[in-house]
Structure formats: C-alpha cells, structure tokens
Image (spheres, helix red, strand yellow):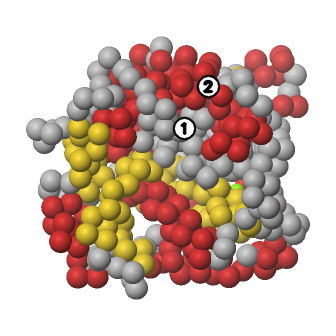
Amino acid sequence: MNRSVRFDDIRALLVCHVDNAGISRVKVLPHRRLLSASTHGVTISNSVGVLFSVDDHLNATPDVDPIVGDLRGIADSSAMALIDREAGLAWAPADLYRLDGTPHPTCQRTALRRVVDDAEDVRLTFTVGVELECTLFRPAAEAGGPPVPATTGPAYSTTSLLEVEGFATDAIAALDLAGVPVDQVHPEFGSGQIEFAFGPRDPLGAVDDLVLARVVLSRVARQHGLLVSFAPVPIVGGSTNGCHVHLSARRDGRNVFADPSAKLGVTPEGGHLIGGILDRLEEGVALLGGSVLSFTRLRPHAWAGADICWGPGNREAAIRFVPGQAGMGAEQSNIEVKPVDGAANPYLAVAAIIAAALDGSARKVAPPKPVRVDPSTLTAAQRRASGVRPLPADLGSALHRLESSDFYRGVFGDVLVDAYVATRQHEWEAYGEHVPEDVADLVRWKY
Ligand code: GLU
Ligand code: MG
C-alpha cells in the first residue's frame, strides 16, 4: 500500500530494520536527508544489522565479521508512513544492502520478498492477516517493583476495555493515521492483555504493517502513561502473547483453502500447503519465535498451537483451519498459524511459513487427518494415528533442528541461517537455564 505521505509533512524519518533477535533497530533522518533515505540509505554496522542478540551481546559468524564492515539500510519509500502529523514523524522499513549496492544475503525483508516471488512464479498468491496480542502495564508502584497489568476485569469483558478505553480509541485513530487500519480490537484473556487484528493483505505489506503497528501502539501507550509488552510471556504464569498469522492462498483467483464440497473443506492443493507447513514445523519453529520464552509459551492449554496438527476451529492445533462463515462465503476461509510470537523476526516467520507451504505444494505433501478435539486429550495411539507430534521442547532443540535443516538453508541461504542461529543460540546459552521470571524481566520491553 502506498500511504502517499507528503515529504513536506515529514520533519524526521525513523528508518527501521528488524534484526535476527526480533528487535527493531532505528536510525533517524532529518527532512533534508529524506530523498537520500531510499537511495543511499543509512549506514548500519554488521553487528547492529545482523549479529546482536536480545541483550545486545555481539555474536560472530564465519561470513559476517562483528567488528569490520558496514551495510546500507535502504528505506523503502513505498512503505513509508506518517505516524505523528504534529511532530512530522514518519517511519519506513529498511532493506539491507552491501556497500556495492547489491542486496545483503542476511536481509530478512528481502528474504520474504524472494519467497513471495517464488510463490508468484508458481501462480500462487498469498495474503496474510495478523493478530497482534500485547499486554499493557502501568508503571511499577516503586522503582524496581513488579509492573502492574493495566486491566483486571474479566477476560474479553467490557469492564476490562473500559479500564484502557482512552488508549484503545487513540490507538485506533493513530493506526488509521499511519495507514494501518485495524479490523478489530478486543481485551484478551489475561490481565492487561489486548489484541489488535489486521485484515489480509500482501505478505510483505502485512509484516511491515505489524512492525509499524508496534511502534504506533508503543507511542500511544506512553501518551497514556502505560507501557506495552509484545513479549511472548509478559508475566510468568499469566496469559501469553501470540502473533498469529492468518494465511490465505489463491490459484487463478480461487481460494485453495475453500472447497465446501470436499471432505476436508479445502482443495487438494490447500491440503498440500497445510501438509507442507506441518511437515516443516519442527525445523522452522525457531523462526516463528526464537526466544527462550517462546517455548515457555508453546505449552498445551495456552491456545498457542503447541501440537503439530490441524483442525477446523481447533485452538490447540498449530494450524487452526478457519472455514468461511455463513453470509461471508467461502472466500473468507483461511488457515491460522498459531505458534508465531512477538519475539520472532516477522519477515522470517512469514517467509518460513510460505516457503514450507510452497514446498508442500511442490511435493504434494498429504495433510494429516484433521484433529477435532484438544490434541492433549488424545492417547499416544490416537496421536500416532493422527500424526500429532509435539513441537521441540525448548529453544536449544529448535535451533538444532533449524541449523541442520537443508530445507531452510536452501530457502534463506547459509549466511542468513548461520547469523540467525548465532544470535538465538547466545540467548539459549545465556538464559536457557534461568528461571522464566528472570528471562521475562529481561525481555519484557525489548520487542
Ligand atoms: N494468547 C494465546 C497465544 O499465546 C492465543 C489466544 C487466542 O487464541 O486468541 O497464542
Ligand atoms: Mg487472541
């Protein structure tokens, strides 16, 4: 979407790049540098672009030197958005380039663009809608004290919403101004938890919107004296934050996830896409979250999709099949990939899902039987019969699967996979043994 921002309205441009730790890093350009933002861009060191972990620990890989070398972060002016009219503040996502002007092999946004191009090459058009869950807090009563969730009312209740009504209405207006219109807002299950759902659009635009929406929501929260956390586990023992990805796919204009006359409710190709995503989930799940806490979240009964299976309306399955509703037609039918969370690099997460779906289509991977009950209630024999498997239990094992994945090395290239694994492996080695409360304190405000 071109948001048609007028350069005259911009006094400062945030040029943002989401790194392998899932953190948005930024350089700010004044008005007089706007034109050069999308030609020369900004200088980003290898370390900041590629190699920092969530705690700003600097890693190294054989291909990317942490000390010597620079990248260019080239702003994509077609995705530029005005986020504060009065302040003249705008935002744009950046692609990573080598100094010689060629795309850098670690650029996560370019990786997603390539996967989408691969899909277009086989005449599949994907769209993505995102459900962004986050948790609002009031500042701690005393310095160093525990943060206080901003709502206490019953889950999904009006009572809960009214506690943060000003934030919610201002957030809707601010998202509109930024060109990221929200489809629906609701108080979520947990204390302080609120969800913003965004309608479907092209995958790259949907991820840009997600990254931008987090900036906008953080700003509006601050204006209301609140802080917002997108971490997968904002409070240990409380409700977790997901970032579910709704995926639609069309071939020749036809929704492959809609065939009401078929037994599974999807076309044969729709089944292959589902089969492909499930088949690659063990090796790809480190790309869908990638923090130690992502695996604290991926437990049964959190509606986070901790089991590798799918089923219509099934909130405990990694893929919830969402059939079209009466009156809206089969066109609405889509799949929701639930294990994704806010610690991911969302460009890589969506690229990993679409690449796996394409692979399923190419190899005609049959989907397992749909699961119509909570998979954790199945016996071991029933799980085997339905092909239900657990996701890797922790970040260490998920990274091991990713590191040894020929498939994802083929999709993203060794330079990117090695850099991603290095940044996340540090997190696992440094914090994997810590109690989750300490890790939650460390990452609560980072994303
Ligand atoms: N909060 C849940 C999660 O961590 C999802 C709840 C829902 O299905 O909306 O994914
Ligand atoms: Mg939700």
Q: Position of residue 169 (x, y in %)?
A: 63, 81
Q: Closer to the camera, 294 or 429?
A: 429
Q: Earlier in the sequence, mark 1 or mark 2?
A: 1
Asked whether residue 420 appears in the rendered view, the answer is: no
In the displayed structure, 432 sits above or below 2; it is above
Q: Which amino acid type is marked by label 1?
A: Asp
Contact flag, marks 1 and 2 (Cβ < 8 Å): yes
The residue at the far front in this view is 143
Quarter assignment of residue 219: bottom right
Please state the horizontal and vertical placement of residue 130, each as a whole percent of the image: 55, 56
Q: Residue at x 44, y 35 (%)?
A: 52
Q: Residue 98: x percent and y percent?
A: 19, 37
Q: At 49% from the left edge and 32% from the top edge, which residue is drawn?
A: 57
Q: Classify residue 77 as left or right of residue 272.
A: left
Residue at 65% of width from left, 42% of height from top? 442
- Callout 1 secondary element: loop
Does residue 392 appear in this view? Answer: yes
Locate residue 431: give its quadrant.
top right
Residue 254: % across, % down: 43, 53
Left or right: residue 66 compared with residue 338: left
Neighbourhood count class around disc 1 (C-alpha, 10 Å): few under 14, some 14–19, many 20 upward: some
Q: Which residue is mark 2?
A: 430
Vertical order, 402 against 298 (above or below): above
Q: In the displayed structure, does residue 384 sit left or right of residue 427?
A: right
Query: Which SS class for mark 2?
Result: helix
Q: How many marks?
A: 2
Picture quarter with the N terminus: bottom left
Is 194 in front, or is 269?
194
Residue drawn at the location 43% of the way across and 30% of the way down: 58
> For the residue with label 2, is its CB less than 8 Å from the closest atom of ligand 1?
no
Residue to which mark 1 is pinned: 55
Q: From mark 1 to mark 2, how far is it between C-alphas? A: 10 Å
